[in-house]
Amino acid sequence: MPLLFIEVDNCHETAEELAAKLEKYARFFRRRVKDTDGRERPMWRTRWMASQDRHGDVPHPPVLLVFNHVGERNPNRTIPRLQERTRHLWQGEWQREGYHLYDGKIPIVAVGLRNLREHGPTGPVFFRFGRDRPQPLLEAIGNPRREAAHAREAEAARARETEYQTQLRKAAQEQAAKKAVEAAREAAQREARRPACAGCGSRFTDARWEAAEETDWGPPVDTHPTLCDTCKQHALAAAGQPADAHQSHGPDHHVQGERDFWRYPNRPVCAECRTPFTDDRWKAVNRTGWGPVRMEPRPTLCGDCDQQYVTDIRQAWPGTTHQEPEQDQEQTLPEQKAGGTCLSRFRR
């Protein structure tokens, strides 16, 4: 039970006398004093505990008038007159949401002692000034219409939040479906571009597709870019080439100087016997540049054919010494005599 002030009348006082008492209650509720923390508060709050209203308005504590019909005055006549004389103390402000606000007002409730004994505080025998029917005590001193309106607002807010979350989930699902359709379309387009083997007609795998499309300064690196792995191995085996002939881009491309470049980015084939070069021979004929590098005289021949060429030359011209040309052979200048000048050579 919240804070409740009770005024008992034995039906000896008039409505005017009771109204004067309620005016004293109003003045008492409006009285303010400084609390222990130095802030001004209503004096009644410094003496009695009462919870703060959570809806914004701050009504005064309710006053319960209990009429004990002992005297000569009839409560049924006194209560209407008292209600009119104290209207400014209890009448609330009507809100468009369907309830009253009682900010700074006194909830005044009347009850007969006989009905209170018969039904108790939970019975609908308490008549609050300004209302058209009796109610249980907690409803009479409270504001059930406001509670119902706030419950409806909270329910509407929850419904709006639920609808908003539903719209968010629907938008997320539509976005996910759109992305899935877009991904499927891109995958279908990619599959349509996927090449097929020229030998067996099977589609390339991703690894084979990437290897077949790899290029080195324009020409494709792979020796059989139109064949799948199986057909390529068969083709290399039929040609007598190693299966990994396409995997090497050249001997040690990335460890050469900045001025060097490669003559044969792909493994060459001997012009005489059509045999693929070995790695050592490929490296020997591949290097060119401007540094002190020895050039191979016959870069289109494999090692065996090159040796056979030298042997044939020696057999054709016996007694001659075959000397390989060197690219960067420095010429030896005549040694200058000690003490000579730059013109001494011309005098000789």
Image: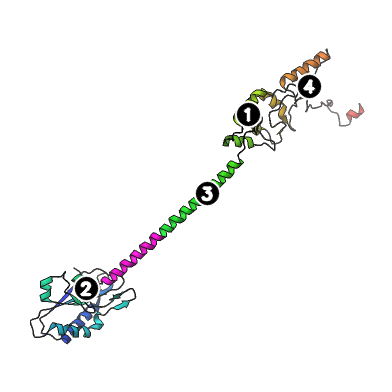
Q: Is residue 68 magenta?
A: no
Marks 1 and 2: in contact by CB < 8 Å?
no
| Location of residue 138 with respect to 9 vertically, above or below | above
Badge 1 amino acid = Lys
Marks 2 and 4, how far apart at CA = 121 Å
Badge 4 amino acid = Glu
Which residue corresponds to mark 3? 181
Mark positioned earlier in the residue sequence (4 or 3):
3
Q: Nearer the viewer, mark 4 or mark 1?
A: 1
User: Could you tell me residue 198's position as x and y percent?
Assistant: 64, 33
In the image: residue 26, left or right of residue 340: left
Residue 128, image quadrant: bottom left
In the rendered structure, which segment of residues is drawn in magenta?
142-163
Q: Main secondary structure of the magenta part?
A: helix
Q: Please tell me whether mark 2 sits on a helix, a strand or a loop.
A: helix
Q: Nearer the viewer, mark 3 or mark 2?
A: 3
Q: Is residue 212 visible?
A: yes
Badge 2 amino acid = Ile
Marks 4 and 3, how far apart at CA = 68 Å
Residue 140, image quadrant: bottom left
In the image: residue 70, left or right of residue 99: left
Nearer to the camera, 264 or 251:
264
Badge 3 amino acid = Val
Q: Residues within 10 Å of mark 2 (few under 14, many from 20)?
A: many
Q: Tell me the number on the disc at residue 141.
A: 2
Marks 1 and 4: in contact by CB < 8 Å?
no
Which residue corresponds to mark 1? 232
